[in-house]
Image (cartoon, rainbow, N blue to C red):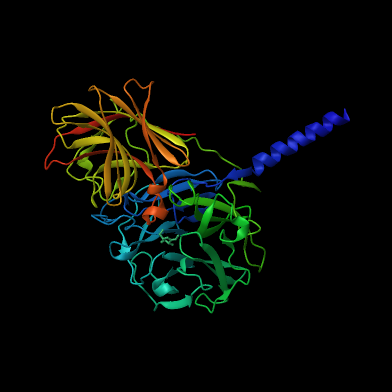
Amino acid sequence: MQLTKITFILTFLTIFICTTYGQGYKNPVIPGFHPDPSICKVGDDFYLVNSSFEFFPGVPIFHSKDLVNWEQIGHCLTRPSQVNLEKIGASGGIYAPTIRYNNGIFYMITTNVSDKGNFIVHTKNPAGEWSEPVWLEQKGIDPSLYFEGDTCYLTSNPDNCIYLSEINPITGEQLSPSKAIWTGTGGRYPEGPHIYKKDGLYYLLISEGGTEYGHKVTIARSKNIDGPYESNPANPILTHIGKEAQMNPIQGTGHADLTQANDGSWWMVCLAFRPQSGLHHVLGRETFLAPVNWEKNAWPIVNGNGIISLNMEVPTLPLQPIKKSLSTNFEEDELGFEWNYLRNPNLNNYELNSKKGSLRLKATPILLDDVDSPTFLGRRQEHIQFTATTKMELFNAKNGDEAGLTVFRNNTAHYKILLKQDDTGKRILALSYRLGELSHTISEIKIPRGSVYLQVKGENDYYSFAFSTNGTDYKFIDKLDVRYLSSETNGGFTGAYIGLFATSKNKTTNAYADFDLFNYLPK
Ligand code: 6LW
């Protein structure tokens, strides 16, 4: 009897704790190329944005109730009038954004490094359309906003220093001179500034060390918003550069933002990367979550020791898992938010036929190698181990026209498995690459006309490419190293995409490809 009572109480307590405070979560909370996270809370809803560089639409926006499960609800920059990406270089375009909410309005501030610099868009509905941009005078990257009553402050980092000014966030007008407020603790690239007010003090959170292995988050505080700022003696509050995190599968932690949940708990979102195949990171910088202990009048402490892990064994907000489909048969009326174009797309070259369940991509003379807008639709590689498969057929093709599946880092680093046509009208399936100045076709196989399944499998060291004519029996073609698509090899700030494309080496072409499915399965 006694035992039954104890078992009952224990079971009740476990259910109560697990539903009230979810137990543990896995990092990254938003996997794949989702760098420079910024977060804000409205009621019990959290919103998060990421940088997007040369990809369109710009600045993906996510929603969550628990900080762990995130659902993409749209993009902040959906119109070319907001985001000019015409012929911009790889990793140009949209750098780190900040999202803030004040008096019923959401603001997203960011930099188009390939256009006029810092700008703000706003909206009442973050899942809807955002305003046209207003451009700002203050230079530097990683602009952020801090609201106090009706006053709005801007921070950014011209000249390797954090500057502050007062602005009108609706018109963009600068209302006070820019003032230098902190240079950080001596690490290179002081950036990603955000101001918060707690217990009567202004806290200035920044990143230093550059977005590499030496990345770190530091913090300073002041009685006055414009300083002088006193550095936390325990800085950095987050970094994986020390020997304690030497073997950690997460590296390069930095570029953070803080939020407080309704239960009083503090949380940090930050970027980091997961090296694979030695010291290469291929997926880009991803979004991670860490609990923060921030006592009254004290400095914030991130996850106890400034180190985070893949399996976070900490209490969370009550978890509200989200069902996500990573695959499509193109039967929905619109493509999911995970799909991106390169630079400003010509939408006439894309036709979604939801009744037929097919996506038509029309070839143009713009190649994946060009600093331009080839016919390309891709989604981020979010998992080190995955299988992506598409079923496709090529129509109206001449020699020089091609379409298929690409693992795409940028215009000078991509792998392609594709269909093309030779001079005699024979159908060829090919595997080729572009790596820096090297372009090479590894394999050309004559196959019968008709639909073909193209497949790429990602593993720690290699991508393996295969094809099938019946969707069941796959013929392995070859494997290619992941590390040649990494940030260490290519530089830049983006990550790998799995894309569908149609291109032509001819001056004019009527070729097009119909894609009937796209399956993306993590292992
Ligand atoms: C971003 C800067 C950074 O603007 O990388 O990791 C730059 N931090 O803050 C590009 O994402």
Residue placed at 57% from the left, 58% from the top? 240
Estimate the x, y position of residue 265 in percent, counting from the top left.
63, 55
Image quadrant holding the N terminus, namely: top right
Q: Position of residue 170 (x, y in %)?
A: 36, 64
User: Where, by quadrant of the figure, is residue 521 drawn?
Assistant: top left
Q: Residue sitting at 56 percent across and 71 percent down?
A: 220
Taking depth in this image into account, of 476 and 187 the one nearest to the observer is: 476
Residue farthest along the left direction in this orientation: 508
User: Residue 200 at x, y = what percent?
Assistant: 60, 71
Count of numbered badges drawn on the protein: 0
> Quarter of the picture for ligand 1?
bottom left
Q: Is residue 381 visible?
A: yes
Picture coordinates of residue 337 (x, y %)? 37, 42
Judge left or right: residue 293 versus residue 160: right
Between residues 481 and 486, which one lies in front from this camera angle?
481
Q: Nearer the viewer, residue 201 or 475?
A: 475
In the image, residue 489 sits, relative to residue 155, either above or below, namely above
Horizontally, is 368 left or right of 384 in the view? left
Q: Is residue 331 visible?
A: no
- In this view, 410 is above or below 425: below
* Quarter where residue 151 is shown: bottom left
Q: Which of the pair 250/194 is nearer the observer? A: 250
